[in-house]
Image (cartoon, rainbow, N blue to C red):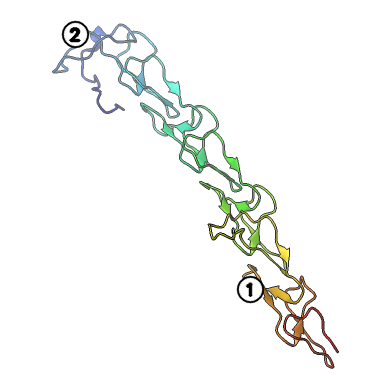
Amino acid sequence: TTCDGFMGWSGCDTSCVTTAVYESGCDAECGSCSSCPECDPGTYQPDAGQATCYSCPAGSYGPSIGLTSCTSCEVGRYAVNDGSCSCTACEPGTYSGSTGGVVCEPCAAGTYQTDFEASTCLDCPAGYYCPERAESALPCEAGTFAATANSAACEACPDGSYSDESCPDDGSACSGGIESCSACAAGTYPHSSDAYCVTCDAGTYSPGGLETCTTCPAGAYCEAGSSEYAT
């Protein structure tokens, strides 16, 4: 493999090859060598008197001409093909934690990475969730929560409770990041979205923390929003 902008020396008279680090290239016709040509970037030759150069193996690169060895890709970078002149930075949501990377690994569920060229992934904080290969931590939506760090998904609020995003009174964007749910107050029950609580209808009641309101028994009555029935 050759790299853009450099000419290989296949077809030259290799009788002149005596050293591993060559001193000049082929002539214009590439029919003979005025002196031994250097290995192209992405290739190397550790020994003297050789007729060809080797491609740098995957996970390494050769950035310049005339190399006797290749360099392993640094952490956070990779080279999937042989003959690479440089290594590629891992993309957000991926990482390479050791040198000589051939591919970047996706961040595991419960972790994320926003940057290029990362050597590790970051823990998803409580109140957020991170699917596999996440490029950022995603806030739990209203009606859900994540009580601990490293959550791959948010959980629905338990029966009789709700959660809503933390929204400032000034109307600016909600911060998200819901870590827990709250029990619905007496006289209310959770909406089907679990994002807020609804007032019990007349004829029903709830002491609070219940999934539905209870029908008033015979011989009793309940006004809207009742926490208990009256006789």
Residue 106 position in % (x across, y down): 52, 43
The mark nearer the N terminus, 1 or 2, is: 2
Q: Is residue 48 above or below residue 42?
A: above
Residue 7 position in % (x across, y down): 23, 22
Local SS, label 2: loop
Residue 126 position in % (x across, y down): 66, 50
Residue drawn 58% across the image and 54% down it: 175
Q: CA distance from mark 1 to mark 2?
A: 83 Å
Left or right for 78, reference 27: right
Left or right for 118, reference 154: left
Query: Which amino acid type is marked by label 1?
Result: Ser
Residue drawn 61% across the image and 52% down it: 128
Residue located beneath label 2 in the image: 34
Residue located beneath label 1 in the image: 192
**Few, some or many C-alpha atoms within 10 Å of disc 2 (few <14, some 14-19, many ≥20)?**
some
Local SS, label 1: loop
Residue drawn 21% across the image and 16% down it: 12
